[in-house]
Amino acid sequence: MSLTVDDVNKIAYLARLGIDAQDTESYAQDLSGMLDLVAQMSAVNTDDVTPMAHPLDQAQRLRPDQVIETNNREAFQAIAPQVEAGLYLVPKVIE
Amino acid sequence: MHTKTLAQIAQGLRAGDYSSQELTESYLARIKQHQGLNSFITVTEHQAIAAAKQADAMLAAGDAPFLTGVPMAHKDIFCTLGIKTSCGSKMLDNFTSPYNATVVEKFNVAGAVSLGKLNMDEFAMGSSNETSFYGAVKNPWATHCVPGGSSGGSAAAVAARLIPGATGTDTGGSIRQPAALCGITGLKPTYGRVSRYGMIAYASSLDQGGPMAQTAEDTALMLQVMAGFDSKDSTSVDCAVPDYSADLNNSLTGLKIGLPKEFFDEALNSEMAASIDTAINEYRKMGAEIVEVSMPNLKLAIPSYYVIAPAECSANLSRLDGVRYGYRCENPADLNDLYIRSRGEAFGTEVKRRILVGTYALSEGYYDAYYIKAQKIRRLISDDFKQALEQVDVIMGPVSPTPAFGIGEKTDDPIDMYLADIYTIAINLAGLPAMSVPAGFIDNKPVGLQIIGNYFDEAKLLNVAHQYQQVTDWHQQTPKGFE
C-alpha cells in the first residue's frame, strides 16, 4: 500500500493537522511503511471472529442520571487560551 | 539513604530513623545533582517540602497510612491539580491541570510525597523517550543510550536512585520496556485494574497505569495504593483488591512456567536469549516446571496494534484543538486555520504520524478493513494467551529483543522502532498483567525478564518476581556514578 502526497494532504485535512509542505513526502513514505506492516493482517481469515473492543468483554456501565459534579467553569476557563463572559472565544464563524 | 527500597524507607520513617523532610530534601538534592539525565520535566520542591512537613506531623501523631512521608514522583501523563501536566508535549506545555488523576489522589491519601513530574515520550508515543518536547532522557547505565519509553523518565529516575518509586503507564510496553532497559522492576496491571481517570488518554482500550520501583516488594506496595474500582473511569473493573504483599513469600515448587516458542525465534539477540535462559534456570532450581507453549498469532500483534492504537489516538487527541486549553497558534485567520495550525505547530512528528494513520484507518471505506480487522486479530491473540494460561501459571520471556540502544540510533526508521515492541504489545492487546524484572546485564546494560500472568493475578506475578529477587541481586545493582 502506497500513499501519495495528495493522500497525505487529504488525511491531514480530515485530522485538521497542519503539516509543513517539505515534510509531506516523508510522511507519505512513513505512512506507506506503516500500512505495509499492517497489511500482514490480511493473510489471516477472520470471517468468524468477533471483534474485541474490551479485553474483558465488558459492556458499557450505566449510572443513575444524577448530578454528581459541581460547576467548575471558572477553574476550567482559567486555563483557556481566550474567554469572555464565560464563553470560549474562537474566530468568527458566521458572517 | 537513596539506595534504600521504598519498603525500607517506609519502615525507617515509622521507626523515626529520619524525618520525611530530611528524606525529601536529600532526594531533591540528588535530583538537582543529576539533572543532566533529564528525567524530570517539573520538580515541585516547595509543594514537596510542605507535604513532607505535614507527613512528619502525621507520623508523630501516629495512625498515619503506610506510605506517609515516602517520596515518589508521577509520570507527566497523570493530571496534578495546580501543577503543570505536559504529557511530554508542546501542546500542553502551558497546561496546569484543574484536577487530580485518581491515581494521584490515591497516593496523596496514602501519604506519599510527590517530588515532581517525570519526562516521557510525547503523549506516551515512543519506545525511547526521544519524542519528548523536553528532550531525550539519558539511561543512567550508559548515558549515550536511551532509557526506553514511554515511561523513560520514571525508569531513569528510579534506576539513578533519584526517587524510590514512580508511576508509569503502559499502552504497548511503556512500563515494562523502560524498566528492563534501566534495570528496575515494573508492573503493568490487568486492563481495568487501575483507574485511567485523569491519565491523559493515548489508546483507551490499551492504556493502563502501574508502578515502577527497585523491587517486586515495592511494586506490590504501590499497586496496593493504585488498584481499585473507580466510577469515574467507564472501563474500570469492579472486582475486589487482594493484599498484594500477602503471597510474596509463597514457595514456587510446582509452579508451571510457559515459554512461548514464538518468543525465542531468530529476532531475539543471542546474548539476550542466554540471559533469559539463565533466569529460567533459577526458577527450575526453585522447583518450577517449564512447559513449551505456542502462540501462533503473536506475529500479528504489531500489525494489529499499529491500527488500534493510532485509531484510538486520533480520536482521543482530537480534543486538543486550541480552543479550551493547551497551545493556540498566533492570529488564526478562521476557525479551521486555528485548529490546523494549533495542532500542526504543537504536535511532534511521531504524534502526527500516528494521528494520520489512525485518521486514515477510521476514514470512510477503510474502517472495516483496518479497525474491525485489527479488533478481530486482537481476539485471536487474546485467545492464544487464554489457551496457554489454561496449561501454565505464568508465561515468561524477554521484554525487549536487545538492551538499551544509542540515543538517535533508531529515530530515522520509525518502523524499526515499532518492531522492538514485539514481546510487550501482545499483552496489552490481551489486557493481561505483566512485569519486567531485572535479570542480568549485556555489556553493562540491564536486561529484563518478562513475567505474564492471568487476568487479575497480579499477586501471583509479584510472588514469582519476589522469589527470584530473593536468589538474585540484579535489582540491587546501582549504575556507576549514582551509588
Image: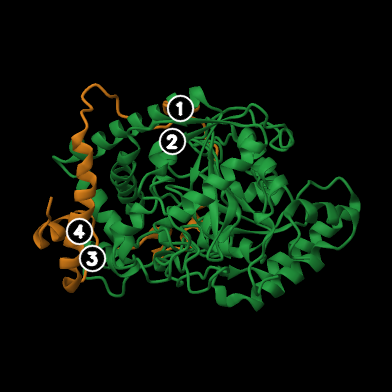
Chain colours: A orange, B green
For residue B175, say whether it is visible: no
**Residue denoted by label 1:** B388
Give the amino acid type for the residue marked by disc 3 in the picture: Gly
Q: Label 1, label 4: how many angstroms apart (C-alpha)?
A: 42 Å
x, y (%) of residue A78?
Answer: 49, 63
Residue at the location (30% across, 29% down)?
A: A51
Q: Secondary structure at mark 1?
A: helix
| Residue B105, position as x, y percentages in the image | 64, 49
| Callout 1 touching callout 2 (CB < 8 Å) | yes
- CA distance separating discs 1 and 2: 9 Å
Residue designated by label 2: B260
Give the labeled residue for mark 3.
A18
* Tag in front: 2 or 3: 2
- The residue wearing badge 4 is A12
Q: Secondary structure at mark 4?
A: helix
B58 displayed left or right of B343: right
Subunit under mark 1: B
CB within 8 Å, label 4 to label 3: yes
- Which chain does tag 2 point to? B
> For the residues carrying marks 1 and 4, which lies nearer the camera in this image?
1
Residue type at mark 1 is Ala
Please identify the quadrant where the N terminus of chain B is shown: bottom right
Q: Where is residue B291 shown, x and y percent of the image? A: 50, 29
Q: CA distance from mark 1 to mark 3?
A: 46 Å
